Image: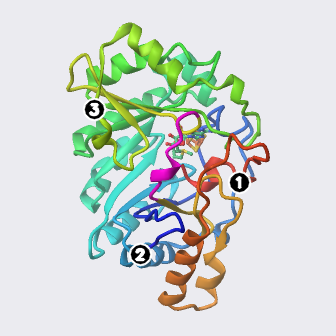
Amino acid sequence: MLIDTFGRVATDLRVSLTDRCNLRCAYCMPPEGLEWLPSDEQLTDDEVVRVVRVAVDLGVDEVRFTGGEPLLRRGLVDIVRRTAQLTPRPHLSLTTNGIGLARTAAALREAGLDRVNVSLDTIDPEKFKTLARRDRLEDVLAGLEAAASAGLTPVKVNAVLMRGLNDDEAVPLLRWCVDHGYQLRFIEQMPLDAQHGWQRTNMVTADEILERLAEAFTLTPLGAEARGSAPAEEWYVDGGPGRVGVIGSVSRPFCGACDRVRLTADGQIRNCLFAREETDLRAALRSGCDDARIADMLKATLLAKRAGHGIDDEGFLQPTRPMSAIGG
Ligand code: SAM
Ligand code: SF4
C-alpha cells in the first residue's frame, strides 16, 4: 500500500504525459508559453506503463492522464490501451482542454478510457479568446460533444474563475452545462501559475461562487457521504438530475482526505501538487532498476507527504514547477 504517516492511502495516480499545451490559460501560463521539456527527458510510453503497473500493484485503482495537454501526446491511445489491460484494471480518466478530442474520443473510449474532464472556463467566444489566448472555443465544444457521444460519461467540465475575466460566467456556464448534460465543477484558482501572479485577495472563492449560483438556482447538497475523498462538494441544481461541484482547494482544503500521488512527464514522483521535493524515478528507471526499487521509491515518497498544502502558512512558498508541468 502507498500509505503516509497520517494514515492516508494513495489510490489515485495522476500521470502527466507532457508539459506542452496549445492554450495559454491566464491562470496557468504566460502568453508566450514556457520552455518545454526536451523529448528525451520525458518518460517513454513503456516507462509510463511500467510505473503505472507497479503503482497498480501497490493499490492504485484510479489513473488520470493529464498534462500540459495530454491529447498532444502521440502515444496516448496506446498508453490508455496498455493500462486498461492491467490487472486489476484501474479506472482510467483524462483531463483535457478538449482540443482534438472530437477526433480522438471514440478511439480513446475503444482503448479503455472510462471518463473525461474537459476544461472550459466560459462559453463566450470573446472571453475564451482573452482567457485562453487562443480562438479555439469551437474545438472545445466539438470535443465535449464527441466525448458524450463516445460514452465517456459522465462528462465533467472544469472551470476556473478569474476576477475581471470570467467571474460573471458562473451562472451562464452552469445553465449551459446542465442543458447539455455535463457536470460542471468550479475549481478555486491555486498558486500554481508559471507567472507567480496569484494573490489570495484576488481569488474568486468557493463561497463567492456559491452565492452567485444560489441567486439563480436552487442548490441541494448531495451530502458528505457522496463526497468521500473527492475534493468537490456537490449540489443538485434545481432538484436534479443536473449537479454542480465546487472545489475549494484553497479556502476549503481537503488535504486530510487526499488519496493522490503524481507522476510528472519527466518521471518525478510528487506526493502533493504543492510538494517542494520530488523523487527522481526517471534516473532509477534508466539505470536499470527492478520493479521492487520503483515500488520502494513510490512508498518512500508517500511516507514523506505533509499533512496539508500549507497555502495559509506564513512560510508558504509556491512550488517552482507550474501546474502545467506537474499535471493538474
Ligand atoms: N490541459 C488540460 C486541461 O486544461 O484540462 C490538463 C492540464 S490542466 C493543468 C488541469 C486542470 O488544472 C484544468 O482543469 C485547469 O483548469 C486547472 N488549472 C490550471 N492552473 C490552475 C490554477 N492555477 N488553479 C486551479 N486550477 C488550475
Ligand atoms: Fe493548457 Fe490546461 Fe494550462 Fe490551459 S490549464 S494552459 S489548457 S495546461
**Which quarter holds ligand 1?**
top right
Identified at 34% across, 48% down, the residue is 228
On-image quarter of the N terminus: bottom left
Amino acid of disc 1: Arg
Camera-side residue of 262 and 112: 262
Whichever of labels 3 and 1 marks the residue nearer the N terminus, that label is 3
Q: Secondary structure at mark 3?
A: loop
Residue 147, disc: none
Crowd around label 2: few <14 · some 14–19 · many ≥20 (10 Å): some
Q: Position of residue 221 (x, y in %)?
A: 30, 27
Crowd around label 1: few <14 · some 14–19 · many ≥20 (10 Å): some
Which of the two marks, 2 or 1, is nearer to us in this view?
Answer: 2
Whichever of labels 2 and 3 marks the residue nearer the N terminus, that label is 2
Q: Position of residue 292 (x, y in %)?
A: 49, 89
Q: Secondary structure at mark 1?
A: loop
Span of residues in magenta: 251-259
Which of the two marks, 3 or 1, is nearer to us in this view?
Answer: 3
Whichever of labels 2 and 1 marks the residue nearer the N terminus, that label is 2
Q: CA distance from mark 2 to mark 1?
A: 27 Å
Identified at 33% across, 12% down, the residue is 217
Q: CA distance from mark 3 to mark 1?
A: 35 Å
Q: CA distance from mark 2 to mark 3?
A: 30 Å
Relative to 10, is 257 above or below? above
Q: Which residue is mark 1?
A: 321
Camera-side residue of 196 and 276: 276
Magenta includes 281?
no
Residue 1, disc: 2
Picture colour scheme: rainbow
Q: Which residue is mark 3?
A: 222
